[in-house]
Image (tube, grey):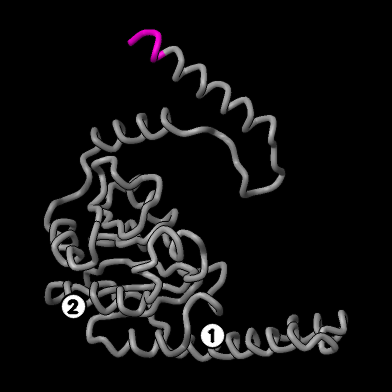
Amino acid sequence: FLNLARSFIRERKFMNVPRLLNGMRRARLYVEYAWTKRYWKRPAPDRPYVYFPLQYSNECTIIIGCPQCYEQGAVLELISRGLPDGVELCFKQHPNNPAEGSSLAMIRRAVRLPNTRLLPVSMNSWDMARRARAVVTIDNTVGFESLLLRRPVVVLGYPAYRGWGVTRDVADLNDLPARLDEALNGGDLPEERLWDFLASFDSEHIKGNWFDPPYDPEDLARSLAEQRDRIQADAAAG
């Protein structure tokens, strides 16, 4: 909040009305985020749980890829109602954008549910997934990491790891309770299926990174050429 205020003074943003209004909106969100910390609770060591990491609602993977999950508070309630007695729903705000990703009103509604627990943002998602009975995800890396841990994963959106036979894919939110039940009672992902999935997944994807600097377009171009050559070789052999 102090950094936001300093930037307004330093860059004279207060002279620009639209930017001033946007700054006031963001300041309110940061104040609300600070208030959500009063609801943070660490997981109970003796209680099984399902882990659902929240996403930033205004990213394209939700707005375009999974608009039915835009109201993540409703998704939280649906998961909560589908859990058996004695199993908690642990959820966590997005670590890169906790203030703008989850409203205070949504957090308040969610923590009032009888079997939910809001985790501190600082908690490690890898550790949470490793100990979870199952993981529910819309479209994020936590789902893929959970597969590496051989945890049952329920997928609501359309990440790259959906549709490979290693996740419980939800086509309609009305089917979520059934897929959740399958994940909780179907056991861990067999190691052989995990390795088969990783080998197929790697062969079908183009290596390269457009997200983290330094960007290397030549590396991505080489990967595209290699993928083209593989496809042409497979077509010729077939």
Tag 1, which secondary structure?
helix
Secondary structure under the numbered disc 2 in the rendered image: helix
Would residue 87 be found to the left or right of residue 214 on screen? left
Q: Quadrant of the C terminus?
A: top left
Q: Which residue is mark 2?
A: 81
At 43% from the left edge and 64% from the top edge, which residue is drawn?
62
Label 2 vs 1, first from the N-terminus: 1
Q: Using the image, determine if residue 15 lies above or below residue 56.
A: below
> In the rendered image, which residue does mark 1 sit on?
33
Q: Main secondary structure of the magenta part?
A: helix
How many residues crowd mark 1 within 10 Å: few (<14), some (14–19), many (20+)? many
Q: Position of residue 114 (x, y in %)?
A: 22, 86
Asked whether residue 125 appears in the rendered view, the answer is yes
Q: Amino acid at mark 2?
A: Arg
Instruction: Check if residue 121 falls in the magenta segment.
Output: no
Can you tell which quarter of the image residue 67 is in?
A: bottom left
Separation (CA) of disc 2 from disc 1: 26 Å
Q: Position of residue 46 (x, y in %)?
A: 23, 72
Whether residue 126 is visible here, answered yes or no, is: no
Q: Residue at x 13, y 52 (%)?
A: 186
Determine the residue positioned at 24% across, 58% down.
170
- Classify the position of the N terminus by image quarter: bottom right
